[in-house]
Amino acid sequence: MSQFFRMLLATLSMGLVASTAAADVSVRLSNEALTDASAAIVIGRVTAAESRWIDRNLVTAVTVQISETLKGGAAGQIEVLLPGGIDANRRFKVAMTYPGAPQMYNGEDVFLFLMQDDDLGGYIVTGFAQGKFSILTQRGAQFVSRDLRGSQLIEGTGISRGTVVLTPLDEFRNEIAGYVSR
């Protein structure tokens, strides 16, 4: 079983055991932990997305054009596999969704923490939605943003609701580069 599906099963199992009311229950990962767990950290733009079946699981394959690599050897275009998707080519359309799974949209600028999944032949996002940040431009300044309000995050012996993060891109990039260089 691939690392992607093992992570998915573990996350879903924890969610079922910990709380049936929560949309998603995951272990909270710090920026340092995301950096350490990732094989690649990139900044880029989503240029395409398509759903496909891998075994009996529907995934969305997202193409990301990389503009900067902070960790790993990823360059040019890469494929990132996201759990879930829509198969509209069937007589009855099929959709699969997973609580806490990252989502990406065509044309979106992203800051990604990625793990290589050799079984699937592509990258997956580290820590589910925790490893995907959108890059926004407001009043001429760029920021990274991540909204985890739909997630319940385990930290220590407790569970807390996720929050919205909005950090200047340069500040965030420098923090992550510092973790990579140590």
Image: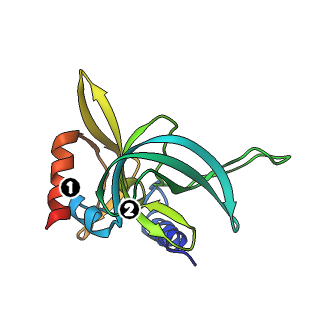
Query: Where is residue 18 drawn, in percent x and y?
Result: 42, 68
Q: Is residue 76 above or below residue 47?
A: below
- Quadrant assignment for the N terminus: bottom right
How far is disc 2 from disc 1 in space, using C-alphas? 16 Å
Element at label 2: loop
**Model colouring:** rainbow
Element at label 1: helix
Task: Kindly identify which residue carries mark 1.
Answer: 176
Task: Kindly identify which residue carries mark 2.
Answer: 127
Q: Is residue 108 left or right of residue 56?
A: left
Q: Is residue 14 left or right of residue 29?
A: right
**N-terminal of the two: label 2 or label 1?**
2
Amino acid on which the number 2 mark rests in the picture: Gly
Amino acid on which the number 1 mark rests in the picture: Ile
Splitting the image into 4 quarters, where does residue 139 fall? top left
Residue 85 shows in this picture: yes
From this viewpoint, which residue is outermost toward the bottom?
1
Are the residues tagged 2 and 1 within 8 Å (C-beta)? no
Q: Residue at x 47, y 47 (%)?
A: 64
From this viewpoint, which residue is outermost toward the front?
76
Q: How many marks?
A: 2
Q: Residue at x 26, y 63 (%)?
A: 35
Q: Is residue 181 above or below residue 60?
A: below
Q: Is residue 93 above or below residue 99?
A: above
Query: Where is residue 145 drawn, in percent x and y?
Result: 31, 40
Query: Where is residue 55 drawn, in percent x and y?
Result: 69, 68
- Quadrant assignment for the C terminus: bottom left
| Camera-side residue of 38 and 152 | 38
Closer to viewer: mark 2 or mark 1: 1
Residue 148 shows in this picture: no
